[in-house]
Amino acid sequence: MPYPLPPYRVGIAGAGAFAEFLAGALAPLPEFQLTAVAGRTDEKRQRVLDAYRHHRSDAAPPREYREASELIHDPDIDVVILTTPPHLHAPLGELALTKGKHLLLEKPGALTSAALKSNAQLAAKQRRAFAVNLVLRYNPLVEAVEWMLRHHLLGRAHHASLHNAAHRVTSGHWFWNRELSGGIFIEHGVHFFEVGRHWFGEPVDARGFAATEANGEQSRVWASVIHRSCTRQGHVQKAQLPTEEAGAESPNEYVPVQYYHGFTMEADAPESTQWEVHCAQGRIVLEGWIPQRLYVEGVLTAEQAELIDALLDTIPTQPAANAGEQVRTWAASRFPSSDRTSSSSVSRLPYRRTLSLVDRQGWYEAMAQARFLDFCRMIQDPNWSGLVTPDDAASDLALAEACTVSEAWQEGLSRDFSSNQTRPLSP
């Protein structure tokens, strides 16, 4: 029996700043109607409601609850969006699914991949849509890079790095309590592991590190991950590489990737997030936590340059929820038709291209809306598991677990590598 048509009645459980953002992003979508909000204080709930009413002033007043469990028990709710701290995701998610709700979880979705998989299995049994709110792959620049790497438009990728320097979170916040948040890689890093897995393939080895401050907080973490992608025998890939490089490819391609996250920036300092991918014929640089600037440079054949230009030209200049889909649709139809032979004698010329997206907040809302609409499709089509699937979310979380934490360095101590011990720093 098909599920009733939209609008679907939504309850947002958890009334922090992110819930406020999601309510504003949800409001313009006729497929959804905010029906209830749960939050511990009147002030927090009111901010969420105001964000929604800013776009939907004529909407019926949503109900208010103090406890998330009260909202979940509301029989008029079709969809629960869970934005509580991470340690509550799994138990409250299980309750929502048991009550027959479709469930969209804020990342990470659980503190362990096992708990997330368990709820995914429950959702399948209950025939309810289930997803984690991982939004970066809904950005058109991220999508464009994926196609460039997938088809070796700058040759094979050999190394990549991600650095994410964010504002410091207040001491004492639940973010710093591993039992509540899981730590930086689990609470935050899953976003970037989702991108890394789809750009470079599944991880085959991972090792995480952290610097522990005197107060016990681990505000800087980093990981070394080896990704492996099976050789993609796509038409474009073979067309772009000189014969000797194409012939040297192995069945598996290994890409070492360094991931760094630091929540250390002062409040008035600019945050920065940057991917840098080094390929055989050039490099790709993607900037912004909400990706806004893409820089590509290399020495390319005319065919490679034309394909990259055409790919980037499909990206809208204004925020749009379907921007990533536009890129996918064009690339899926164009790339398979580019099967041409190549040789080492093909001339190559310097190439540089920069593409910038303005209106950061608008693009952030567009990415959230794309996730919402993808979730709507999951509700309506039980065979559709989403662009970012529950299996993806579980794999991202498993990688985050593997990177939390193999080695830690204590501030004020230096490591004696000969004895694998630490000792006080010399004055």
Image: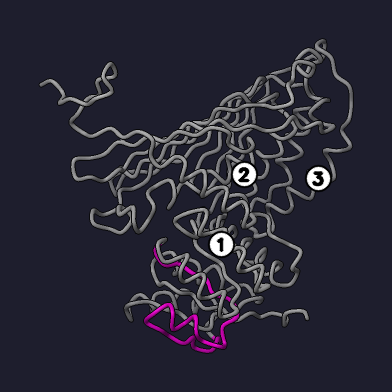
- Residue 227: image quadrant is top right
Is residue 10 part of the magenta span, yes or no?
A: no
Q: Which of marks 2 and 1 is nearer the N terminus?
A: 1
Q: Earlier in the sequence, mark 3 or mark 1?
A: 1
On screen, residue 133 above or below 336: below
Q: Nearer the viewer, mark 3 or mark 1?
A: 1
Q: Badge 3: few (under 14), some or many (20 or more) residues near its Cα, within 10 Å?
A: few
Real-space Cα distance between discs 2 and 1?
Answer: 29 Å
Residue at image position (64%, 42%) is 198
Question: Left or right of 328: which side holds 317?
Answer: left
User: Do tag 2 and tag 3 residues touch (Cβ < 8 Å)?
Assistant: no
Q: Give x and y (percent) for residue 39.
A: 38, 77
Residue at image position (53%, 83%) is 35
- State which quarter of the image contains the N terminus: bottom right
Real-space Cα distance between discs 2 and 3?
Answer: 15 Å
- Residue 269: image quadrant is top left
Which mark, by number, is residue 192?
Answer: none
Real-space Cα distance between discs 3 and 1?
Answer: 34 Å
Which mark, by number, is residue 118?
Answer: 1
* Residue under label 2: 142
On screen, residue 230 above or below 180: above
Residue that protrudes farthest toward the left in the picture: 427
- State which quarter of the image contains the C terminus: top left
Q: Give x and y (percent) for residue 398.
A: 52, 47
Residue at image position (53%, 89%) is 60
Amino acid type indicated by mark 1:
Ser
Which mark, by number, is residue 332?
Answer: 3
